[in-house]
Amino acid sequence: MRAKGWDAVVVTGSDPHSSEYPAERWKQVEWLSGFTGEAGDVVVTLDHAGLWTDTRYFIQAEQQLAGTGIVLHKTRVPEQVLIPEWLEGQFGGEGIIAVDGLCVGADFAQSLPGTVLSVPDLLSRFWEDRPGVPQTPVFTVDPGESRREKFDWIRAFLRGKDCDAILLTALDEIAWMLNVRASDIEYNPLVISYLLISKTGVDWYVLKDEVEDPESKATFSILEADGVRLLPYADIDYLPTEFTGRLFVDAATLNYQLYSSLSAAGVALEQGTSPVGLRKAVKNPREIAGMREAHLQDALAMERFLYWLEKSVEAGREISEWDAAVKLGQLRADLPDYLGDSFETISAYGPGAALPHYITPHVHAPSIREDGLYLCDSGGQYRCGTTDITRTVPLGRCSALEREDYTLVLKGHIDLAMAVFPEGTPGCRLDALAREPLWRSKRNFGHGTGHGVGWFLGVHEGPHDVRQNLNPVALQPGMILSDEPGIYREGRHGVRHENLLLVVPAGESEFGRWLAFEPLTLCHFDTDALELSLLDRSEIEWLNAYNEKVYQTLSPRLPQEISAWLRDKTRPV
């Protein structure tokens, strides 16, 4: 930095496609700082190093940054000072800020004060064993809508915007548009690539090395037959000088290096929100049917797992958090459509559960005892859909505070699940339904209440959500989102209850059309830790009906001893 005359370097936790989960090559924040959370950015000046992350990771960051000299800067709190403001305070808008332009979004880079320099692969000169760009086998899926139909739809969008082409850079949008999947990023069935769709052609910048595997060759042949031209991934660098016409881009996902190159080359850019995210979020009937099947399969693994866990602990077997995570993975692996986990399983007992995104140790993991609460947040990728479920279960005697927290979080979960709301309502207006039972007891949680989920895609997707941020995107029938309130007491315990919900029509009245939620997740809520006096009659009725549906749906498909156990677990309260 001194040699280059830089005042600050900003290193983000993303990749050239603004991905939430980057491949190993782009885990630059982890390499630089040791912080392994999914959301974190580092700023280094000549006399300071700071990590910016949100409420989900405060405890984890403090532990992982201890002794590094890196200061934690907290976000999503009232007193937050975000990176642009902080840099403005340090340099008064006069600083020279270096960024890896490949891994910084154009929107974010433009918000930084002073002179911003794009230095692609900035850390490569130090990161000697840095992984390369992955290239895994690519295969096709059938979501009920062909890629040709999707091309026609996007070209109609281009005509409406008077643009000649659209450049898609978000990996989930590319996978959805082309009906393809791969494993370039762990837990995410995505292909690292760029996609240019014009009025007359489609260019897919995807090739990294010689393609050897038969599945990819067959997939690429199918795509070429549909008019898709395959190009080397690195050839995106030539687009700024080769493209003529008006190009639609989404600056929220377009990286700053490519944005700067296009601008410098004089390409006429139409900036706006990509239409693919919203279209992708509204699932079609085939995708909804697939998600139902995925959740049915996943539920069978979950109930087998919870039965095994309870009986193992009761028998006094030595079970660690890691042992439990491995067992759940083995049970999912036995399912016919399972292709892998949708994220790293959070298997947490006692104090570990107080970290919303706890990383279960592979070695020396804490033992699970016949006492208190155990939390498991996990999910699977299936050829027919994606799942995400959290269950907190009592494994023995629970304290009065544990029972209160357990019940209030479940109360909030149920209140959101029972919601009926007018068409056009965004998720931010429903967020308080899940928090109000906790707020009344002056308790709260720092993460969002709900996120979108893709169809055999990312476990987190937008543009809709349920959180306190003022997101104006309205919920629509066919959208899928999570319902996961929680509470976390550092050093003691954590509680989270999560189902995935499908937005469905709920009828019409003289006041308009109405929507509601239908749970997709099928796994009982344990009632042993409930403080029933905290639940009202409608909440108890919802809970009893849900648990009965779980039993009636799953019991014919489970071994007799597990079915009998589940009958006991789902008896009305």
Image: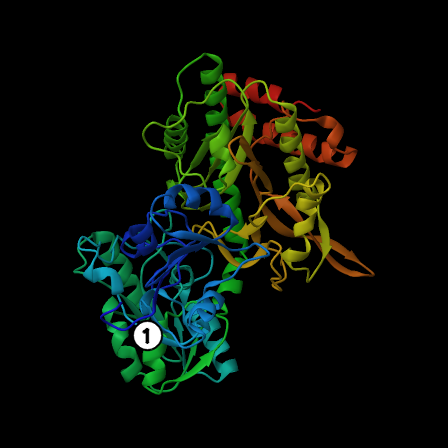
What residue is rendered at 42% in x and 63% in y?
173
- Front residue of this view, candidates 355 and 241: 355
Q: Residue at x 38, y 87 (%)?
A: 245
Quadrant housing the C terminus: top right
Label tally: 1
Tell me the element at label 1.
strand
The outermost residue toward the top is 315
Residue 213 percent coordinates (x, y): 20, 52
Quarter of the rendering containing residue 552: top right
Can the viewer see residue 397 in this picture?
A: yes
Name the residue beneath numbered marker 1: 117
Furthest-front residue in view? 47
The picture places residue 36, in percent across and down from the top left corner, at 37, 47
Of 489 and 412, the residue lying toward us? 489
The amino acid marked with disc number 1 is: Leu
Expressed as whole percent of the image width and height from the top left, the position of residue 273 reads 50, 71
Towards the viewer: 67 or 52: 67
* Horizontal relation, residue 115 to residue 25: left or right: right
Q: Quadrant of the N terminus?
A: bottom left
- Residue 88 in picture, x, y percent from top left: 46, 71
